[in-house]
Structure formats: structure tokens, C-alpha cells
Amino acid sequence: MKHLYLPHKLVLVSFCILATLLFSISCSKNETDIIVNDDISQNPSEEAENPIEPPVASTPPKNCEIDWDALQENEILIIDCNINLTQQIISIPKGVILKYEGGMLLDGTLQFEGNNKIDGDLLHHELHISGEVSLTENSFIFHPNRWNITEGMVSDQTARANRDILEETMHRMQALGALQFVIDKMDAYFNVDEPETLRPSIAAITIPSNFTLKMTSNTHLRMQPNAAIRPTLLATFQGENITIDGGVLHGDRDTHDYLTISSTHEWGHLLRITGTKNSTVKNMTFMDATGDGVDVHAVGHSFDPFYTFCDNVTITNNTFIRNRRNHISITDGRNIVVENNAFIDASIHTNASRGVAPGFAIDVEAVRHGNPRGISEIAEDITIRNNTETGSRVGAVTVHTGDRVTIEENTFERSISYSTSIGSIIRNNTLNATKDIDKTNGIAIVAGRSDLFDRNFDNKVYGNTINDFSIGIVASNKDLEVYSNIINNTKTGISIESIRNSQFYSNTIKSDRDGSDGIVSHPNVVYMDDVTIGGDATEMGNRIQVLRTPLKFVNINAESTTSDFKLIFNHNNINTVGTSTFSNSHGFDFINNQITEGGIRLVNASEAKFVGNIINTSTANGFRIDAGCQNISITDNSIRITDPRFECVKYNDPGINILETNTTCDKS
């Protein structure tokens, strides 16, 4: 094979392209530590370490000429000087490869005859190509100045041109065989403001399928300030096998025009992932969106013939800062993984804009109702793993509507909750309350919603560590297991609403806060049916050490329709000076529990059994029977009282059909 070498080695100073595969195209259209403060917005052009550098030679480029007619098929032509094509159309024979070694081809058109290759570093906006040609490498490096990208603050028209150039160049490089599109240092605004009749992803910079957009912490893509309701900076639409790796995306939340169009303006997202499969978003920073950092949703609704849902999408190793609505919303998708991300200040108020509902780091919220044709959206088989969250305005994670969601191994400052969920798991998370609002009124984990009873079942909450919240766990609905959680320094460990077919076991609740309680019924409770607090073996019992009431159950199964319902306390270990209270409650068994300090108080209780319990106390009566009790059996209990002021069984009211047998009473 013959090589045609040109005589000079050059430095390339300006580089951009418009190219085509098989047809002619013009150019008209358009890891370092993250600094978590305003400096990243104020000084985005500051270079990070180890940027991607363009090829640089030791001498400036020189001009030269070439006899194109002498070029033969299958030759390799090395371009090491500037060649002005003088607006000519140059035919390139079959099989010829054009290689970059510092030069440029200027002001003309290359027409390839077939099976040709060209080095991506030769392409720029003043060079046009046509015919059958591909890149010599499958990774293309994009240098903004070579493509007519205008950096810094610009007019809307220029920002629109920036958008068009970047999107079209990605698609054209893919047509030339690029699988990866690399951008390093760039700080530019992109106008994605389109009429609301357009699909948001049309206005956005859309990433094609089977493609990687690779950026660095030097790459800043900024949304041009606008008044639109649904602007989107980056998008995937019905794509597959897409990777977006690196880069910093900036929204316009504090420069947005909220007044021209009447709206909440909560739908301006930095990345919309729509109907996309087998794709990954990683190593990015999403900050200051008017809406969400990332929105994952479908094309259409589940009843539409064109419905396309997201499947097998991973969002990993990203940082989210101050996005105005949520950091991530998942409204439709299957097999979505959100892991190893840092969520900072979701939906907080700033000096220039207020956060808007919902206000979570992550919100799984599929719309299931409201359409006679069926369920609108489906979100299921979602994993939220090993993330950190700080400073969210409302909460860390909420599953408003979604099934088989696993939330595990995360470290959060704010709450986890689900409202409508089937088969979900909250496990092995650490929740540390740092805000006063959470210490005084906050709930670490909300497992269910009492007004959506039949829509929550087969869920589990286990292995979590909760510190310093007002309430550790609130639980309701049915078929729920809450176990092996460690709940420290709360005002209330576990609060239980109306519930059925559920178990609470092997939890440890310890608090030295004044007035702290262990496991209690929620003030709005109506019934508990087939519910066990503790278990059949000692190791399944809950361990409770608080300063006020270890167990407090009021108004349980008090209605005639709940007369057959059953609540069981089994093998719990209680160590507190306070007395456990059962008031206006019916249909419960208290079996094989051990109480060290404190005792049991019954008020208007009925249909209850107390069997095989061990009570050692110096602070209360073993049992205290107050007014309204009936049909209660106290059998085979061992009671030791060390203060003469108290009794093993104290009757303040004789009650009706109170059966006490085989009580061992030690008042030594």
C-alpha cells in the first residue's frame, strides 16, 4: 500500500465539521471532587485535573498543496499541514484513508467513492463530506471551538444554534461509525425553549441509541433561561443501549421566568429518559433544575398501543444538587436501578426560587387511576441502593405508587415512605435525623397509608438503623413484616395504625429522651387483626428500653365488627420504669413476655389473656386492673415486687369475669 506523506508536522488550532454517510450534509442546524456550593455555578470554567487535551505539535501549522488527481485507491494519506480546498469538490478514490497528523482540510467538500475512512480529528464545520465513508476510530473527540459552539452567556438565538450543533454533530458522528462522543472542556448555554405543543425531548439535546456521550467535570451544559413550562436539557427517547457518562448539567431555576406563563413550572428537567431500555447514566452532576434532575417515564400510557416503558435503566455515581422539584422522579419503568448517588438539598428554597412539591430526593410515582381505559403508568422492580441524602426539603425517598421497590443500604437524613406499594422492601438503611423538624415531628419510615388499605401488602421493613427521629416507624395496611430494626433515641419507636396479618419482631428500641415510648397504637387506629408483636421464640421478641411507656395500645378492636380480631404480644423483653397500658382494647393475648421494671395496666380491656409472663419491678404494680375490664385471664405468671407500695395484682375495680390462676407472687 502506498503512503502519501506531506512535509510538515502541525498544531491544530480550529476544528469542526458537518459530515454525512452516503449523502451530502450542510452545517445549518442546529473525575474530580464536586464542589457543592455556588462556586460550581459561578466559576464553571475552572479546569479539573487531567482534562482531555487535543493533539498539539511543537510548531504552528503550515499551508501546503496536494495533487489530488495523483491519489490512488487504497492509499493512506497523512494530513500534516493546512490544505485549502478553495471550495472545490474533491473526489477521494475507493479505499483511501485520510489520517490526521496536525493538519486541516479547509473550505471544500470531499466526495468519497466508497469504503473510505477519515480521522475524526480532520472534521470541522467548514469541511463537507459525502459518499461512503466512516471514521478511523469509534470514539470521537468534540472540541467546541471547531464546531462553532459559542461559550459563555449568549443570546437565545446563539444558544439555539449551540443546541442544534451539538445534537446534529452527535448524530452525524454516529452515522460515520462513532460509538462514543467525548467532550471535555466546554461551558455553554443551550436554548431548549420550544412551544408546548412539541414533545419536550424534541426541543432537548437528544442522545441517539447505541451511543455513549462521555463528558468530564470540565463539561458544563447550561439551560438557557426561559419561560417554558416543560423545557428539557438532555433527553433519550425510545432509545436503547445509551450511556451518558460525566458532565455537569445546570438548570435555570433561579433565572427562570415564572411569570409570563401561568404554571407551577415544575416540569423543567435536566434529563428526560423516555421509553428507553438497557441504558446507564453515571458520573454526572445535576443541579438547579426548575423541575427534576432526572425524570424516568414512558411513551404514552399502559393502555396505549404505542406504549413504550423504560426497562433496565441504571442511574449511578451521580451528584444531585438543589433541583427544585425532585432530584429523580420515576413515573413509569421496570428494572430501574438508582445506586451510589449523592442527593443534596432536594427542593430547598433559595433566595430566588422556592422549592415545589413533592420535594424528595427520589419519588416513585406512577399514576394508576383516573382513566376509564385502565392503569395509566406502571413503576415496578426498582432498586434504590447505597445512596446518600442530605438536606431534602420533604424527604429522602417516597414510593407514592410503585411495586416491588427495594430501598437498601442507603444513608439518609430524611424519611423513607410508601403510600401505595405491593411487595416492596425497606432494609439495611441508616437514617439519621439532623433537622429539628425531624427530631420533634419527623417519622423515619412510613410503611403504608391507612386510607389506601387494599393497595399496600406483602411489604417488609427490616435491618434499618434509625437515630434521633421523633418516630421511628409508622406502619399500617396488611401483610407487613417489620423486624430487626434498631431504633435509637426517638420519642416513639413504632406506631401502628389499623393493620391486618402482620408481624413486628426482633426490633430493638432504646431511648433516653424524656417521655419516650416503645411500641404504641396510632391515635387514628381502629383495629388490629392477626397481628403479632414479638414471636414464638425468645429471639423473636422486641427489646424495649424507654423512659415512659414501653407498650401503649388504645382503642383497639373496640367496635362490634372487630369482635373476632386478634392481637398477640409474645416473647418481648421490656426494661423500663414505665407501665405498659391497654385501654379500651379487646381481643389480645400477652404471652411469655419479660418485664424488668414497670408493669401492666388494664383499662376497659376485655377478651384478653396474660399467660407465662415474668415481671420483676420496683416501680409499679405487676398488674393493675382499672374500671371496665371483663373476660380477662391472668394465668401462670411470675411476679416479683421489691417495693412494698405495690402489689403483684392490684384491683382498683373488680371487673367482670377476671380469672387469676397460678400466679407466683414474690414480694421479698
Image (cartoon, rainbow, N blue to C red):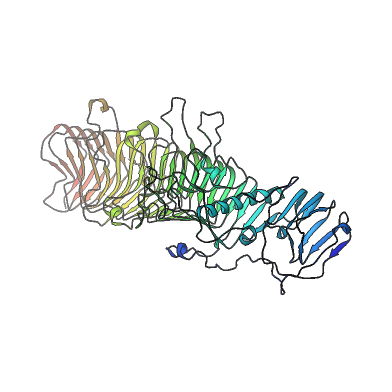
Q: Nearer the viewer, residue 22 or 247?
A: 22
Q: Residue at x 73, y 70 (%)?
A: 61
Is 642 placed left or right of 232 in the picture? left
**Residue 535 seen from this side:** no
Q: Is residue 45 above or below residue 542?
A: below
Q: Position of residue 156 (x, y in %)?
A: 50, 53
Q: Residue at (80%, 52%) from the top-left corner?
A: 116
Quarter residue 475 falls in: top left
Q: Answer with left or right where residue 438 lies relative to residue 268.
A: left
The residue positioned farthest toward the bottom in the image shown: 58
Q: Position of residue 392 (x, y in %)?
A: 38, 53
> As displayed, is residue 3 above or below residue 646?
below
> Residue 84 appears at what percent x and percent y?
76, 62
Along the line of sight, the residue nearer the viewer: 65 or 241: 65
Badge count: 0
**Quarter of the rendering occupied by the N terminus:** bottom right
Q: Nearer the viewer, residue 631 or 120?
A: 120
Residue shown at the point (26%, 36%) measured from the top left:
525
Task: Indicate the position of residue 490 as horizontal and vertical percent values.
Answer: 29, 53
Residue 474 appears in the figure: yes
* Nearer to the camera, 639 or 573: 573
- The residue at the point 73 percent across, 66 percent down is 102
Asked if residue 39 is positioned above or below residue 525 in the image, the reply reads: below
